[in-house]
Image: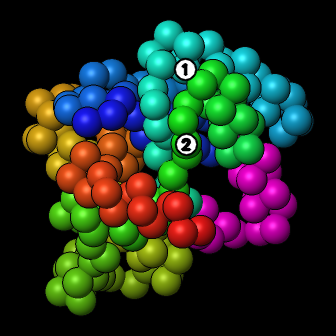
C-alpha cells in the first residue's frame, strides 16, 4: 500500500490524516491572513513543510460539491489550489478527489433515513427547516467521529479532522476505486 494523505480542506484550515496500511498521524493546520490570497500563501508554506516531513505518495482530497455562495466557491477553489500546488511541489505523485457522499456512505455514514429525520423532528418540534438541516448535518458529523474513533482507537472530537480520517478510511478500503475514479476526471 502506498503512503497517502487524506484532506478535508476549507478556506481557513487543513484537516489531514497520513496513512500507509493504517492511520499514522492526524491533525489540523489553521491558515492566517485577512484576505484569501494571504491565507493561501500561508497554507502553501505550511503544507509544503508538512509534506516534506511526512512524504506521502498520494493526496486524497474531498471534492467540492456544493457551496452556499459563488464567493465561497471561489475562495475554496483557491485554498484547494494552494494545497494541491504545495503537495505537487513537495513530490506527491498525484492528487485524487472523492465526493463527500461517496466516502461518507463508504464508511457506514449514509444520508439519514426518514426514520432518523423524523426522530430529530419529534425530539425538537416547531423548528425552522434550516434548523433541522443543521441538526441532521451535526448528527452525521457525530456519527463520523464515532466511526473513526472506534475503528482507529482515537479520541478525535474535531469534525474536520474526523472527516479527514474518514476520507482516509474510505481510501484504505477502496484504494483502486479512488485512484481509478480520479484518473477519469
Pick the front one: 168 or 124? 168
> According to the image, what is the colour scheme of the structure?
rainbow
75 within the magenta span: yes
Q: Is residue 150 visible?
A: yes
The residue to which callout 2 is attached is 94
Q: What element carries label 1?
A: helix
Residue 90 image point, x, y percent: 63, 22
Q: Over which residues does the magenta segment extend?
A: 64-79
Residue 121 appears left or right of 4: left
Residue 149 numbered tag: none
Residue 58 image point, x, y percent: 47, 37
Q: Which of marks 1 and 2 is nearer the N terminus?
A: 1
Q: Is mark 2 on a helix, strand or loop?
A: strand
Pick the front one: 52 or 140? 52
Q: In this view, does 7 lie above or below 41?
A: below
Residue 34 appears left or right of 163: right
Residue 77 image point, x, y percent: 74, 53
The reply to whether the C-beta atoms of the residues labelled 1 and 2 are less than 8 Å apart is no
17 within the magenta span: no
For image coordinates 27% across by 77% down, the residue present is 112
The residue to which callout 1 is attached is 51
If the image is split into quadrants, where does the C terminus sit?
A: bottom right
Q: Is residue 36 above or below residue 184?
A: above
Please tell me whether the stretch drawn in magenta is mainly helix, strand or loop.
helix
For image coordinates 77% across by 68% down, the residue present is 69
Q: In this view, does 80 lie above or below 127?
A: above
Amino acid at each position: 500500500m502506498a503512503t497517502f494523505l487524506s484532506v478535508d480542506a476549507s478556506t481557513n484550515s487543513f484537516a489531514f490524516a497520513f496513512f500507509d496500511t493504517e492511520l499514522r498521524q492526524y491533525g489540523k493546520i489553521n491558515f492566517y491572513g485577512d484576505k484569501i490570497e494571504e491565507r493561501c500563501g500561508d497554507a502553501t508554506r505550511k503544507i509544503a513543510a508538512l509534506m516534506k516531513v511526512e512524504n506521502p505518495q498520494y493526496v486524497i482530497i474531498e471534492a467540492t460539491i456544493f457551496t452556499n455562495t459563488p464567493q465561497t466557491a471561489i475562495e475554496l477553489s483557491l485554498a484547494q489550489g494552494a494545497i494541491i500546488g504545495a503537495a505537487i511541489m513537495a513530490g506527491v505523485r498525484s492528487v485524487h478527489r472523492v465526493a463527500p457522499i461517496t466516502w461518507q456512505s463508504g464508511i457506514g455514514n449514509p444520508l439519514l433515513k426518514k426514520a432518523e429525520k423524523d426522530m430529530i423532528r419529534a425530539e425538537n418540534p416547531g423548528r425552522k427547516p434550516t434548523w433541522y438541516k443543521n441538526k441532521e448535518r451535526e448528527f452525521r458529523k457525530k456519527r463520523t467521529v464515532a466511526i473513526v474513533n472506534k475503528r482507529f482507537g482515537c479520541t478525535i472530537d474535531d469534525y474536520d479532522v474526523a472527516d479527514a480520517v474518514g476520507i482516509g478510511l474510505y481510501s484504505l478500503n477502496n484504494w483502486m476505486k479512488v485512484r481509478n475514479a480520479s484518473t477519469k476526471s
